[in-house]
Image (tube, helix red, strand yellow):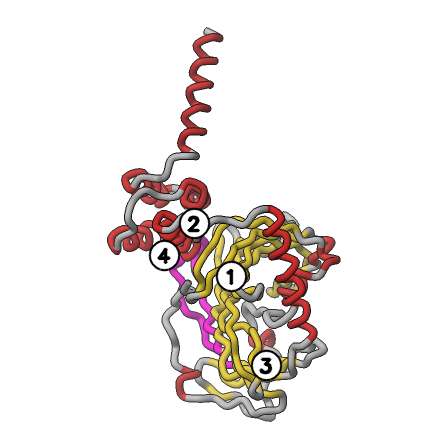
C-alpha cells in the first residue's frame, strides 16, 4: 500500500509542476472562469496562472466579455489577461529585468519620488466623490451620495478640506464644513504625498519584488509588489460609528513604475496586520497619477482614487467605495468653483487601464 501511495503522490506532484510551465489553453481558462463563480477566492489562482504560465490563445472580444461577466468585472483579472496577451504576442518586450537591474530601477524610483515630494508646490484641487456600498464580494454597488470637496495642499504636507456641495446642494460659504469627515461615511486623505513617501522613504524598509510588465495609459511600466510592516508604515485606519476606534496597520500592494523616467504612475495598496477584533476587516486604495500643469510647470499628481473598506455587521459583510476624481489643479489661493458637471451623478465605473 505504501508503494502505491508513493507513486500517486509523485504523479500528482509531477502534474502540478508540469501545469506551471505550460501556457493556459482557452478551454482551461474558460473552466477556471466558470469555477470562479462558485468560489470567488479562486481569482488569485487565475491571476497567478495568467502571470506565471501565460496563454496560448488569442484574446478575442468574446474572451474579454466572458472575463468581465464571470469575473464580476474585476480590474485586476482583466489587466492580467491583457498582459498575458501582450506577452504571448511579444515575449521580449515583456521580459522582466535582472535582479541587479530591478534594484537599480527601484533606487531610481525612490530618488525621483522623494525629490518630487520635496518639490511639491502649494495648490488647490477639486474632488468629485461618489460614495456607494454593496454586500462584500458582489461588486454590485449602490450609490449613496455625491460630494464636491475643495482641497488645499501646502508644501509642508498640510491638507485642508472644505465641502462645497452634497448631492448637488451647495453648502453656504459661512457654514461650509471644513472636512468631508463631518458629513459621515467613508473618507480618505493622504493621496498626494503620504502614500508614496511611506513606500519609498528608507526608514520604511519596504520590500520590493518585480512581478510583471504592463502598459498603463500608453506608458510602458514595470510592476512591483511591495510590503511595509506595521511598525514602519504606521498607517492609521479609523472606524466611525456609535463610537470612534482607530488602529495602526502595515501595508502591501503593487506599484507601476514608468520605464522611461522612473516615476510611479499607479499604486494599489491594502492594509495589513489589522487586529482581528477591529470593525474594519479590509482597507484598500488604488491611486492613478497623471501629469498636470500648475502655473506653467508639470507635476505628477493623483487623477483618480478608488477607496474600499469592508466591515462586518452581525452576519453580513458590507463594502463601501469612494470613487474620487481630482479636477482643476490650480495655484494655492485660487477659488474652487462648482460647475454644472460637478453635480451630475456618474455610473460606478471602475478605474480603467
Where the N terminus falls, by quadrant?
top left
Residue range corresponding to the magenta coloring: 128-148
Residue 142 position (above or below residue 326): above
Residue at 43%, 10% (x, y): give it.
4
Q: Is residue 119 visible?
A: yes
Residue drawn at x 47%, y 88% as measured from the top left: 338
- Contact between marks 3 and 2 (CB within 8 A): the answer is no
Q: Determine whether, in the image, residue 279 is placed left or right of residue 203.
A: left
Give the residue pinned by disc 2: 92
Give how far across and how far down residue 351 sits, in percent.
43, 65
The 10 Å Cα crowd at callout 1, few under 14, some 14 to 19, many 20 or more, is: many
User: What crowding class fits label 4: few (fewer than 14 Cα within 10 Å), some (14-19), or many (20 or more)?
Assistant: some
Q: Quadrant of the C terminus?
A: bottom left
In the displayed structure, does residue 120 sit left or right of residue 296? right
Q: Which of labels 3 and 2 is toward the front?
A: 2
Q: CA distance from mark 1 to mark 3?
A: 21 Å
Sooner in the amino-acid sequence: mark 1 or mark 3: 3
In front of the other: 296 or 203: 296
Q: Is residue 154 magenta?
A: no
Q: Confirm whether residue 236 shows in the render.
A: no
Q: Residue at x 59, y 49 (%)?
A: 209
Label 4 – label 2 distance at C-alpha: 29 Å
Query: Where 149 falls versus 207 (above or below)?
Result: below
Label 4–label 2 contact, CB within 8 A = no
Residue 308 tag number: 1
Amino acid at each position: 500500500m505504501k508503494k502505491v501511495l508513493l507513486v500517486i503522490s509523485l504523479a500528482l506532484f509531477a502534474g502540478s509542476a508540469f501545469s506551471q510551465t505550460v501556457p493556459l489553453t482557452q478551454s482551461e481558462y474558460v473552466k477556471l472562469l466558470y469555477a470562479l463563480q462558485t468560489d470567488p477566492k479562486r481569482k488569485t489562482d487565475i491571476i497567478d496562472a495568467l502571470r506565471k504560465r501565460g496563454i496560448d490563445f488569442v484574446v478575442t472580444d468574446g474572451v474579454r466579455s466572458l472575463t468581465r461577466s464571470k469575473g464580476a468585472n474585476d480590474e485586476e483579472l482583466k489587466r492580467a489577461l491583457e498582459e498575458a496577451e501582450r506577452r504571448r504576442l511579444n515575449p521580449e518586450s515583456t521580459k522582466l529585468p535582472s535582479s541587479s537591474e530591478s534594484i537599480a530601477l527601484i533606487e531610481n524610483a525612490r530618488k525621483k519620488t522623494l525629490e518630487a515630494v520635496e518639490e511639491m508646490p502649494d495648490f488647490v484641487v477639486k474632488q468629485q466623490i461618489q460614495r456607494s456600498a454593496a454586500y462584500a464580494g458582489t461588486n454590485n454597488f449602490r450609490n449613496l451620495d455625491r460630494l464636491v470637496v475643495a482641497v488645499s495642499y501646502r508644501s509642508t504636507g498640510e491638507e485642508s478640506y472644505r465641502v462645497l456641495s452634497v448631492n448637488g446642494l451647495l453648502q453656504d460659504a459661512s457654514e461650509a464644513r471644513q472636512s468631508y469627515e463631518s458629513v459621515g461615511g467613508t473618507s480618505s486623505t493622504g493621496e498626494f504625498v503620504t502614500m508614496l513617501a511611506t513606500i519609498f522613504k528608507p526608514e520604511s524598509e519596504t520590500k520590493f519584488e518585480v512581478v510583471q510588465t504592463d502598459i498603463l495609459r500608453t506608458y510602458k511600466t514595470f510592476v512591483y509588489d511591495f510590503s511595509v510592516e506595521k511598525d514602519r508604515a504606521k498607517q492609521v485606519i479609523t472606524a466611525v460609528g456609535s463610537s470612534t476606534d482607530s488602529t495602526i496597520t502595515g501595508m502591501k500592494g503593487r506599484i507601476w513604475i514608468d520605464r522611461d523616467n522612473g516615476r510611479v504612475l499607479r499604486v494599489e495598496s491594502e492594509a495589513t496586520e489589522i487586529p482581528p477584533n477591529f470593525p474594519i476587516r479590509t482597507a484598500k486604495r488604488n491611486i492613478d497619477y497623471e501629469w498636470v500643469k500648475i502655473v506653467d510647470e508639470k507635476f505628477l499628481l493623483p487623477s483618480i482614487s478608488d477607496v474600499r473598506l469592508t466591515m462586518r455587521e452581525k452576519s453580513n459583510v458590507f463594502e463601501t467605495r469612494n470613487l474620487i476624481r481630482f479636477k482643476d489643479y490650480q495655484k494655492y489661493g485660487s477659488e474652487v468653483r462648482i460647475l454644472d458637471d460637478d453635480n451630475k451623478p456618474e455610473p460606478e465605473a471602475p478605474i480603467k487601464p
